[in-house]
Amino acid sequence: MKQKGFRQCRSDINIYVQTKQGQVVYLVLYVNNLLIFNKNLDEIKKVKLTLLKVFEMKDLGETEFCLGI
């Protein structure tokens, strides 16, 4: 993730943050799941496309429930 411009959060090693042109994107990793947070849906789609080029993954759509959040 660091090669893609994300930096690992100091307080939680499973959270990555990318700041680009005023946009902040959060990636939250948990076992084999990934959540992407951003106000702009287009920015989320860009991150997904970038990740799909590197990792084998499925898009399960929007999160309906996240334990602990």
Image (tube, rainbow, N blue to C red):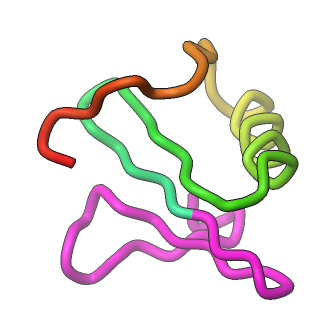
Q: Compared to 55, does 24 lie above or below?
A: below
Asked if the magenta segment contains residue 34, the reply would be: no
Q: Position of residue 2 (x, y in %)?
A: 58, 67
Where does the image place residue 22, in percent across and percent down from the top left? Answer: 78, 87
Query: How far from the left and from the top, in percent, is residue 66?
Result: 27, 33
Q: Nearer the viewer, residue 25 or 3?
A: 25
Residue 6 part of the magenta-drawn span? yes
Residue 29, located in which quarter of the rendered image? top left
Instruction: Name the residue located 60 percent from the left edge and 19 percent from the top edge.
Output: 61
- Where 24 sits versus 63, above or below? below
Q: The N terminus is located in which quarter? A: bottom right
Residue name at image x 78 percent, y 80 percent: 20
Q: Relative to residue 19, is residue 36 drawn left or right?
A: left
* Residue 50 higher or lower than 9, as above or below: above
Tell me if 67 is positioned left or right of 66 in this view. left
The vertical placement of 36 against 25, above or below, is above
Q: Quadrant of residue 65?
A: top left
Number of marks: 0
**Residue at x 21% of width, y 48% of height:** 69
In this rendered view, identify the residue nearer to me: 52 or 28.
Answer: 28
Q: Position of residue 7 (x, y in %)?
A: 51, 76
| Residue range corresponding to the magenta coloring | 1-25
Relative to the observer, which residue lies in front, 10 or 69?
Answer: 69
